[in-house]
Image: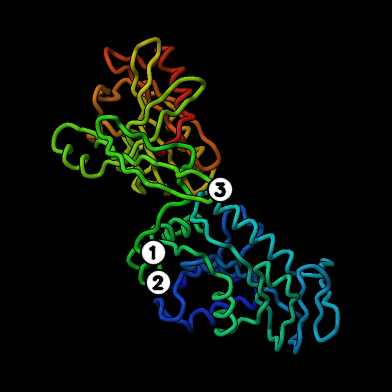
Amino acid sequence: MRLIRLGVEPSQIGVDVRAALSTWGGGDSVLGGVALLGVTPPDCPRALDAVIVLPRGVLVVVGVDLPDPAMRLEAPLSGQWKIDGWPLTRPDGATSPAAEALEATTAVARRIQDMRGEPLPVTTVVAVGPYVGQVVQPTGDLNRGVRVVHPKPTTLLAAARELATSDRPCSADHAAKLLAVLAPTGTPPDAGQLRAEGFSDAAADLASASTLLLPKVPPAARRPKWLPYAAAGVVAVLLVVGLVVALTSGGASEAASSTSAAPQPTTVVVDGRNFSPKGADRTEECAGHAFGDVRAWLAGHLCLQLRRAQFETSVDGRKAGVAVSELNLPDAARAAELHRVASVAGSGGVTALVKEGRTWPGGPVSFDRAAIKAVTKTNQVRIAQVVWVDGDSDPADPALTALADQALRLPAHQ
């Protein structure tokens, strides 16, 4: 367990939480993971004693200071808490401190979802003290993923093992993104440090997989394999599986493109117009694939991920190339700031894939003098660039600017 202290724990019992976690030591020999101590994630209603990011789950730890030590604590999620048979009274009139803990957990889960973080289960640990001999919780509350414990190394370890139960382990890259989402002011550990804490080398990006687009098989490259599937009372179903011709590219990048080609999705339709996908890319290195003022801004700010995609379409029989980029920022405020920079004429933008050698037959050789449109939504900034494949392009061309508006609704992945 790697500890990162970002602030003072908001409760007195939070000191015991930190002490218990520190006894596990670094590495994954006991449990692994990273604990953010004294952290206040964006949009969270309160400071948290800890957020523990584990390879198979996220634990939100909220400390509750009791007025006195207790031999027995009855701690339902809804209803009166009782200390040794006596009702717990608080100045604010609340009968169950668990409600505040659940509110914080909900905020953390929403933050991870909005930022497109790894979809790990987010559960709650309510740490109580100064001392509690026995905690009684209803079975239904336990099934909801909430544990009320006096924070000792053994009780926290048992809670973590019971609650962090994702079927798919989190990779080191996804863990770094999660940590940046939860604590955007700090710098997450590097991939090597995260692997030492039990995070895997890689994991399939199931959260971003699209089920709406089907693989496209060019007729010239089709190599059918008939796969029969039988079910009682139903005739066999035959599935044609094809191989896709690699995208050709100019210069030294041609060999690299031929070895990394992937099946391309079918045509995407926006407002009745067909857009043919011509390649996509994803990276966490945002500034290195931008230019102008946009590159300068990204070099000084945290960017979680850049997705790029390119398409081909036609307007009144004239072919056009389309480049779409999607930048994921830690929060809406920074997305709005980047949007202001990208919306200024001549301020730069994101480098199109064709400039990095990802061309396609009959496509544009560059996106110079492209019509550019940018839009922001929550923590994302989307930028669309459109040029004519043949002839000169004018950034003020009404046909190109209208096409750029449509392109903002294209997916940045294929």
Name the secondary structure under disc 3.
Answer: helix
Real-space CA distance between mark 3 and mark 2, rounded to the nearest whole angstrom:
26 Å
Q: Is residue 360 left or right of residue 404?
A: left
Residue 230 lies, with reference to residue 164, above or below; the image says above
Q: How many residues crowd around disc 2 within 10 Å: few (fewer than 14), some, or many (20 or more)?
A: many
Q: Give the labeled residue for mark 2.
A: 197
Residue 145 circle label: none
Query: Are discs 3 and 2 less than 8 Å apart at CB?
Result: no
Spot occupied by residue 239 in the image (x, y as percentages of width and height) = 39, 41
What is the quadrant of the C terminus in the image? top left
Q: Is residue 220 left or right of residue 317?
A: left
- Ranked by sequence position, the earlier of labels 3 and 2 is 3
- Ranked by sequence position, the earlier of labels 1 and 2 is 1
Query: Are discs 1 and 2 less than 8 Å apart at CB?
Result: yes
- Ranked by sequence position, the earlier of labels 1 and 3 is 3
Real-space CA distance between mark 1 and mark 3, rounded to the nearest whole angstrom:
22 Å
The answer to whether residue 50 is seen in the rendering is yes
What is the quadrant of the N terminus in the image? bottom left
- The nearer-to-camera label among 1 and 2 is 2
- The nearer-to-camera label among 1 and 3 is 3
**Tally of numbered discs:** 3
Q: Give the labeled residue for mark 1.
A: 189
Name the secondary structure under disc 2.
Answer: loop
Quadrant hosting residue 96: bottom right
Residue found farthest to the front: 233
Q: Give the labeled residue for mark 3.
A: 114
